[in-house]
Amino acid sequence: MAARLIIGGVFLYSGFLKLTAPPEEFAAAIEAYRIIPPSMAIWAAHAVSWSELYLGMFLVAGFFTKLCSMALGSMLAVFIFALASTLLRNIKLLDCGCFGSGGGRTAPFAILEDIVLLLITALAFLYGHKLLAVDKWIHAGDAPKINDGSSLQEK
Amino acid sequence: MENATTQLPQTRIVLNKEIRKLLKITFSGFVLVFIPAMTVLLARHLNYVSEVPVPSFRQKGPENAPVQITEYTDFACPGCGHANQTLHTLFSLYPGKIHLKFKHYPLKTIHKWSLDAAIAADCAGKQGKFWDYADRLFETQEKWNGSLQKPGEFLEIALKTGIKKDIFESCLSDTGTIKAVEMDCAEGDFKDIHATPTFFINKERVVGPKQLLEKTKFFDRLSSFAPPHQADGASKGLGPAKLLLSEADQYWDWPPG
């Protein structure tokens, strides 16, 4: 549950910061990566910010835990790839844009941070749904599953 | 037949459970989507700030122009220098169609002399030389930006632009002038400006010279806004802003390293 709360909390906070600041500022940070055309940066900024907010919120609550942790893990992998590509292409990022604009994180530091978060996301994927999760409440009436994939009720 | 009648209640129980589960998912989803969305909207709403008045010497173009631009700039930032050139081109392409309000937003933590530059520019403005002085500050930003001691360029430029030295020097320490710049910074902070240059074009936020160029595409779509000789093409998005956009590649280096 701790892993779920950490990852969910980080993304919820990051999404909230990006959404309460003008999207153009985060779009400018995205533009600096030179991966997508500048005209699309604003759409990417909106999409990433809202995704972070909702996936973070869902994970904190333990709602579709496995699906959300997989989605957030994929996002982290994309972030790591994008940051590494700036290092390979010798692009000097003043700010990675990880927590909106103005955070001042450099690419190597942000890569390390994302790798740690990715490991915690794996823990959330494996164990996140077991304690104080909405998923548990939703499936409360379900019969416990046994090894052959059938349920006790069916037996 | 008997088998079918015993299976019916079991099917009902399973169906009821599935419906209950679906209701739980819908309810949880609704609550979890609604709460963050409302929080974000409320936070954005509370961020509303009224505008600090801009002195007339920091305004350009007719007040009722179809395109209203408010600019937040730091004289020491290279991106602002690029954007300044773009604005000059826009003013020559669309005479009388743009109204520009210039606001200071010196990034004091990374540019040591940008606040002094802003104050000096306002002092030049009080003698009617703001735009000339601002252009020269942008042109020479590399010289004075890295200076360890207070740059001599501020006075040099003032003398070159025909500003009276004694009035200019007394103005530099005038609390009213300093306060006007600080008010611009405070307004910028309230508007969540973290990067320069930031523009508000007809109240829409645009950050950096690259986005400014991108925005000019929409200028041409307003036929009333385009110059007369471009009116036909302009309505199809083929006006002079296209020329500007072709220069866009030179701005790939923003934000500067």
Image (spheres, coloured by chain):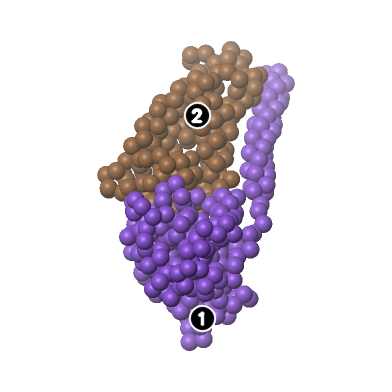
> Which residue corresponds to the image point at 43% horizontal and 29% vertical from the top-left?
A117
Label 2 amino acid? Ile
> Which residue corresponds to the image point at 54% horizontal and 70% vertical from the top-left?
B126
Q: Position of residue B248 (x, y in %)?
A: 37, 66
Closest to the observer: A39 or B57? B57
Secondary structure under tag 1 reads loop
Residue that label 1 marks: B95
Q: CA distance from mark 2 to mark 1?
A: 53 Å
Which chain shows up in brown? A
Q: Is residue B40 left or right of residue B91?
A: right
Label 1 amino acid? Pro
Secondary structure under tag 2 reads helix
Closest to the observer: B168 or B117? B168
Q: Is residue B42 left or right of residue A101?
A: right
Closest to the observer: B128 or A32? B128
> Which residue corresponds to the image point at 63% horizontal and 59% vertical from the top-left?
B52
**Relative to B221, is B144 above or below?**
above
Residue at the bottom extreme, as displayed = B229
Q: Position of residue A97 (x, y in %)?
A: 44, 44
